Image (spheres, rainbow, N blue to C red):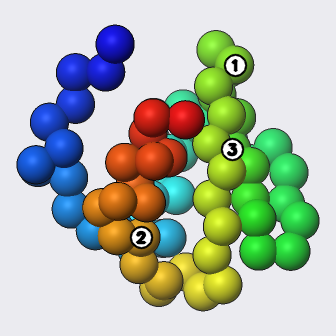
């Protein structure tokens, strides 16, 4: 199903994660408080929750986001 090598996954800041999503074709669909939902044209959806753009997502959280 997923052929991602999680051993190479590193922590990312919210800013870097959002930039990576945008480069992959995601766009901001809606925003509510500290939750932002990004939507891709093929229907994929990613919710990113953070308080400050410099907040760091640890590898475990990134893995959960990728698998959902």
Which element is circle 2 on?
strand
Q: Position of residue 54 (x, y in %)?
A: 47, 85
Q: In the drawing, what numbered circle is on residue 38?
A: 3
Q: Considering only vertical position in the picture, is 45 above or below 32?
A: above
Q: Position of residue 58 (x, y in %)?
A: 34, 70
Q: Earlier in the sequence, mark 2 or mark 1?
A: 1
Foreground pick, 15 / 37: 37
Q: Which residue is mark 1?
A: 43
Q: Considering only vertical position in the picture, is 46 above or below 47?
A: above
Q: Which residue is mark 2?
A: 57
> Which image quarter is the C terminus in?
top right
Q: Earlier in the sequence, mark 3 or mark 1?
A: 3
Label 2: few (<14), some or many (≥20) within 10 Å?
Answer: some
Q: Are marks 2 and 3 in contact (CB under 8 Å)?
A: no
Residue extending farthest to the left is 7
Q: Earlier in the sequence, mark 2 or mark 3?
A: 3
Foreground pick, 60 / 51: 60
Q: In the drawing, what numbered circle is on residue 60?
A: none
Q: Which residue occupies 43% across, 60% down? A: 61
* Image side of residue 12 versus residue 37, left or right: left
Label 2 – label 3 distance at C-alpha? 16 Å
Residue 20 is at least partly visible in this image: no
Q: Nearer the viewer, mark 2 or mark 1?
A: 2
Q: Which residue occupies 50% across, 46% down? A: 65
> Which image quarter is the N terminus in?
top left
Q: Position of residue 11 (x, y in %)?
A: 28, 68
Label 1: few (<14), some or many (≥20) within 10 Å?
Answer: few
Which element is circle 3 on?
strand
Label 2 – label 1 distance at C-alpha? 24 Å
Q: Considering only vertical position in the picture, is 59 above or below 25?
A: below
Which element is circle 1 on?
loop
């Amino acid at each position: 199903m997923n052929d991602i090598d999680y051993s190479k996954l590193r922590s990312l800041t919210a800013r870097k994660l959002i930039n990576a999503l945008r480069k992959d074709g995601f766009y901001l669909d809606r925003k509510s408080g500290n939750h932002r939902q990004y939507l891709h044209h093929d229907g994929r959806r990613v919710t990113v929750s953070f308080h400050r753009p410099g907040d760091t997502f640890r590898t475990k959280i990134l893995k959960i986001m990728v698998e959902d």
